[in-house]
Amino acid sequence: MLGKTASGIFWMFRYLERAENIARLIETGHRFTLTRNRGRQDEWRSILSALGMDAAYRANHEEYNAAQVVDYLLRDKANPGNLRNLIDSARQNARTTRTAITRELWEAVNECWICVNDALKRQVREAELPATIDLIERQTAQVRGALENTMLRNDGYNFSRVGNFIERADSMARLLDVKYYVLLPSVSFVGSSLDNIQWETILRSTSAYSAYRWLYPGRASALGIADFLILDRRFPRSLAFCYGKLTDNLRHLAMSYGVQSDSLTEAERIYAGFASMTAASILEDGLHEFLVDFLTQNRRLAAMVEQEYRFNS
C-alpha cells in the first residue's frame, strides 16, 4: 500500500476517534457541572487543558462559560480542531482512499458527516446537548461497525486499527488526567463523596459504567476504577486493551511488509509494562505523572509508525 493511502486510512480513524472523544469530554464536563455547585469554570477549563486548547480558547474568550466552551469544541471556526472539522477531515481522507476501503465504509463515513453537520448548523443549546452527543457517538460507532463487518483483514484494516487505538489511548489518558489531576479540588477530597461521584462520571462518559458494575459489584472506588480503565485487558477503552490491539495490528503489518518493525518493538515494550503495574502502585507514584509519561510514549509510537511506513511519500 502506498504511504499516502496508509496515512489517509490511519488519519481517517484517528480523526473519527478524536471527534468521538471530544464529545465524551464535553459529556464529562456537562455531568461534572451537574454534580458541583461551585467551580464550574474550572471544570470547563480542565477539559480545554486536556485537549491542549486552553491558550487558544483564552485568546478569543474572557471566561469559561459552558455554552462558549461547548460551541468552541463543537463548531467554532476560531478552533481548527473543532469536532465538525475533525469529521470533515475524516471524510476527506475517506474520499482520497476510496479505492482502498469498502463501499459500506465510505457510506458510513459520509452519513456521519451529513448527520453531524446537520446537528451542528447552529449553536447547540444545553437542553439539546445530551441528544447531540448521543448522535455523534452513534454515528462514529456505525463507521467502526462498517469497518469490522466489511473490510478485508489486510494492511488497510490494520492501519485503520492502529490509528484508532493510538487515538483512543491518548484520549483515555487525557480523560483520566482531567479527573484526577485537574478537577479534584485537593488531596483532602480523595475518597470523599465528591471524589466517588467524579469517578462514576468518568465511567459513564467512557461507556464503562455497566461493565465496571458487573466486575466490581458494590460501591465504586478510585482504586477499582483506575485498575479497570488503565489495566483491565477486557475493557475496550482501557490503556492495556488499546495496546494489546495495537501490538496485534502492528505485528500483522510487520509480517505483511516483511520488515523488522521498530514500532512493533516499542508497542510490545509498552504493553508488557502494564503487566508489571498495579493500580495501587500507579496511584501511589502519581497518576498524573504516569499519564504524562504514557502520553509522551504514545505520541512517540505514532511518529514511529508514520516514519516507518513512509506516510509522507
Image (cartoon, grey):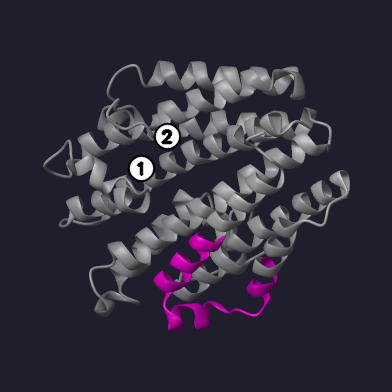
Mark 1 neighbour class, 10 Å CA radius: few under 14, some 14 to 19, many 20 or more: many
Q: What stretch is highlighted in magenta?
A: 271-297
Q: Quadrant of the N terminus?
A: top right
Secondary structure under badge 2? helix
Is residue 53 depicted above or below 237 in this figure?
A: above
Which residue is identified by label 2? 133
> Where is residue 9 drawn, in percent x and y?
66, 32
> Where is residue 74 drawn, in percent x and y?
35, 31
Q: What residue type is labelled 1?
A: Ile
**N-terminal of the two: label 1 or label 2?**
1
Residue 279 magenta-highlighted: yes
Which residue is identified by label 1? 26
Residue at the extreme left: 62
Label disc, if present, on residue 101 of the rendered structure:
none
Mark 2 neighbour class, 10 Å CA radius: few under 14, some 14 to 19, many 20 or more: some
Q: Image check: 16 left or right of 99? A: left
Which residue occupies 25% across, 79% down? 188
> Where is residue 131 drawn, in percent x and y?
40, 30
Q: What residue type is labelled 2?
A: Ile
> Where is residue 137 drawn, in percent x and y?
51, 35
Secondary structure under badge 1? helix
Q: In which quarter of the image is the C terminus?
A: top right
Between residues 122 and 221, which one lies in front from this camera angle?
A: 122
Viewer can see residue 234: no
Magenta stretch: dominant SS?
helix
Image marks 1 and 2: residues in contact by CB distance under 8 Å: yes
Q: Find the distance from the CA under tag 1 to the CA under tag 2.
A: 8 Å
Residue 2: quarter of image: top right
